[in-house]
Image: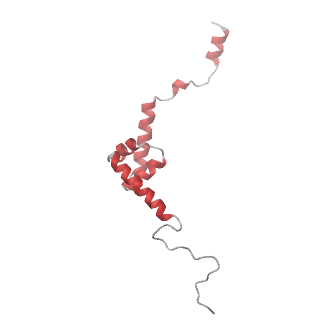
Amino acid sequence: MSTRASRMNSDAEPEVEELPPAPALDRIARLAALQMLQGKTQKEQVALLQRAGFPHSEMAAIVGITSHQVSVIKTGLKGDKASKKPGAPGKAAPPKAGSSGKKGS
């Protein structure tokens, strides 16, 4: 046995091949997602999966809806974010600086 080969065998470094194959990691991610989504509405589920970086097709498969429904929910989420911003339509504008709202004294 060569010196190089004996050194390689004596090192206890893990090899990349020890990682589970991608399909196994995918299943683990899906199981974790399913557990995390229990008891949540579809809208909440899609929001969580979106933040986790899942594509539309995977979100649809996990939640049990169509990819189109995922798109509709995501569009609604964008609208929800816009309505929560200060000064958004439907919200009262904050008072201007220097005005107390009282009539002349």
Residue drawn at point x = 43 percent, y = 42 percent: 55
- Residue 12 drawn above or below residue 87: above
Pick the residue in front: 43 or 94.
94
Find residue 15 and report its horizontal and vertical position in percent. Answer: 56, 24
- The answer to whether one can see residue 83 in this image is yes
Q: Residue furthest front?
A: 104
Q: Is residue 69 left or right of residue 9?
A: left
Pick the residue in front: 10 or 2.
2
Q: How many marks?
A: 0
Residue drawn at point x = 56 percent, y = 74 percent: 94
- The answer to whether one can see residue 39 in this image is no
State the quadrant of the C terminus.
Answer: bottom right
- Residue 92 drawn above or below residue 104: above
Q: Residue furthest top?
A: 1
- Residue 104 drawn above or below residue 80: below
- Residue 52 drawn above or below residue 27: below
Residue drawn at point x = 50 percent, y = 74 percent: 92
Q: Which quadrant of the structure image shows residue 2?
A: top right
Find residue 102 and report its horizontal and vertical position in percent. Answer: 59, 87
Pick the residue in front: 54 or 36.
54
Q: Is residue 12 left or right of residue 71?
A: right
Pick the residue in front: 101 or 53.
101
Q: Residue furthest right?
A: 3
Find residue 76 and report its horizontal and vertical position in percent. Answer: 40, 57
Q: Is residue 30 left or right of residue 105?
A: left
Find residue 70 and report its horizontal and vertical position in percent. Answer: 37, 49
Q: Residue furthest bottom?
A: 105
